[in-house]
Image (cartoon, rainbow, N blue to C red):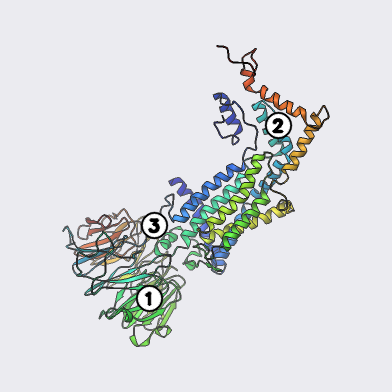
Amino acid sequence: MDAIGFFFDNLLINPMLNIIVMLYSLLFSNFGLAIIVFTIIVRIVTLPLHVRQIKQMRAMSEMQPRMKQIQEIKDPGERSRAMQSMWREAGVNPLGCLGPLVIQMLVWVALFRVLIKSLGTNPDDLVGLAQRLYSWNPFSDVSIPLNPDFLWLDLAAPDPTNVVLPVLVGASTWLQQKMTMTPSADPRQAQTNKMMLWMMPIMLGFITLTFPSGLAVYWTVSNVAGVLIQYFITGDLGPLFTKDAPQAQPVLQAASEEESKENDSDGDGTGGPVRKNRRRSRRDGPERARRKPGRSRNRGPKPR
Amino acid sequence: MILFPRGLFPHALDRVISRLGLNRPRAPFPRPPIRAVHLALASLAVLVMLSVVGCTGRSLITWGESGGDGWTVTAVDDSRLYVVSRQGTVFALEGVSRDAIPRILWTHELAQYHGAFGTPAIGREHIYIGDKGDLEGLDGQLLALLKDREPTSGTIEGPGLLQDGEWSHAIEGGIVGAPVLTDDESLVLVASDNGDVYALSTTGSSRDRLVWSFSANGQVWSTPVISDNMVYVGSLDRNLYAISLDRELGSGDSRLIWKYETDGAVMGSPIVLDGPSGKMVVAGSVDRNVYALGASDGELIWSFAGDDWIWADPVADEEHIYVATMSGTVYALDRDGNRVWEATLEDGPPVVARPVVHGEDLVIATDEGKLFRLDTGNGQRIGGFHDLSGRVKASPSILGGNVFVGVEDNSVRGIDLEDWREAWNFSTKDR
């Protein structure tokens, strides 16, 4: 825990605190503007990661038909190798999409602490703040104490209206998720995506009721920036106007139909061979390999 | 049966599963290696953690700073030590000199107490305690307790009731600095976190309590200082104010005699002392400077640049003015603002508590819980430092050859000034 505390203090909270205090000084002693500009800076710094994430998601989407084919490979080793090979060829790292998310969460957690540390209203808080500000920070002396007022908000306290910021956070999170949702080949996955599309905004909106409104400002601005970045990279707002599992279903359907056509030897259009394959695939598994010779699966009772 | 979550690390997991023979029957595979549900669960875990932190105001991880409202504050009169604990219990102790075992005269648990930061003011009959209030908008209060109150009232079993002759007065925004009495004890002055300075009558009914008030432009954490019918107080709005104590002037801006704007918040209290050309007011600022201003006109006489924020009140003896910074540097200045000596406390701990001068000793407690003793003549350290194992922000008090320090570990330590050893340790928590 000490290591985590050290990491957060020295690599995240203190630098962030000093940057925000500096921005506060430069932006007319307005903490709200400081948070907004800080959010934009974070978005700019993480832009390469974000762009990479979008590209990878697109590539993953385009790989869906091939992924479906690989799913039919029975041997796990071969299947994994095929999957790896596909990712390598496409230049996709499935863990790559984690980067922006992790950074986002770290910044969020750190900002939470920064708000508590910087906008405290009693002497203890200010003593703590003094120890976190770098002595060479030329803005630290003239900025203290920081004014937490921004529009109708006290940035250190929850939104007094209990409505505006929760709705903004929820709506912008929904928008951002809708724009970036990965199409899925797996219906269960698609269902999960659909659930998350609604659950996350509702939950974030709900916890905004109890969190400092500065965090809600950060979250809203960050989401809006994310949507704009997405728009400028992909050039369309398509995902916003499609149903819940964007692109995935048509692609999969097309892939299935293609497969069906290829395998439909009797020409009845029912995809019979695919079903045949499925039956065979069950028999071809390791279970079959271990089956005793001469015994079929539908044999009668075990010999005693 | 699937015994392991699948998909996160397909190769490694498959190898392990195959080796252990756990791979029958198989779930449909492969799936996208990082599934939205994993991300969602991770996000949920973090958000739940943050929700707990946000809702309770408590940290799940120790971040290196102790919380809690208020400090353990001490005050003394001729023979007694008064302690206000962080839990809101007031102790009156007698016989605290040297190695004597202190006797508790009375205790009183304060009702609706949220924390005291300033040293209580001790009058002839009353002790005045300022309460900060809380962030939820509850007002702070000024409490006047009898020094010789009935010992039975107000125990640890529950908040005590005020006795005859005691009173309280709600202060909007709460009190951070200490209350201060006029010489005749007819008025007690307190400054509020809302930026108001109040003069309250110590006598009469509660309706007539407020005599006058004055509003600064920002929070006031400084203890007002009274000298020659003037009140000097610093504000977080960067100004040092001089206001009139005159009862006849009423409330408002008409009280303002002068104000001097520094480049940083003025946290601590000023001191008033004789300067080269009459009385001067000396105050430190977060802009790292010490300012000496003419007491009557607020004209700058001199300023001295320190190495860090100056929060602790300056103190003075016949020769020097002593100033400690948040970097743990102590300066001794002469009355013309020239540096006489400079000392650095070990590891540069921040100094928030007002130092105390005792004879030729300058005793300084740091926020990191160390107690130092310096020679006022040359700044040399006398003896080692005491590690008080808790933060110290409240000003120490001196009585009977001991210096008493309220520590944030809910104790008061008594250090014998003669042989510089810890002679006394009083826990305020389990009583």
Question: In the rendered structure, are the residues bearing label 2 and label 1 in contact, judged by CB atoms less than 8 Å apart?
Answer: no
Q: In whole angstroms, how far apart are the C-alphas of marks 3 and 2?
A: 56 Å
Q: In whole angstroms, how far apart are the C-alphas of marks 1 and 3?
A: 27 Å
Percent position of residue A225, x then y: 64, 57
Tell me the quarter of the image containing the N terminus of chain B.
Answer: top right
Tell me the quarter of the image containing the C terminus of chain B.
Answer: bottom left
The residue wearing badge 1 is: B233
Q: Residues within 10 Å of mark 3 (few under 14, many from 20)?
A: few
The residue wearing badge 2 is: A70
- Disc on res. B67: 3
Q: Amino acid at mark 1?
A: Val
Q: A283 or B376: which is nearer to us? A: A283
The answer to which image quadrant residue B203 occupies is bottom left
Q: Amino acid at mark 3?
A: Gly
Q: In whole angstroms, how far apart are the C-alphas of marks 2 and 1?
A: 77 Å
Same chain? Circles 1 and 3:
yes
Q: B369 or A97: which is nearer to us? A: A97
| Residue B430 in view, yes or no | yes
In the image, residue A94 above or below residue B328: above
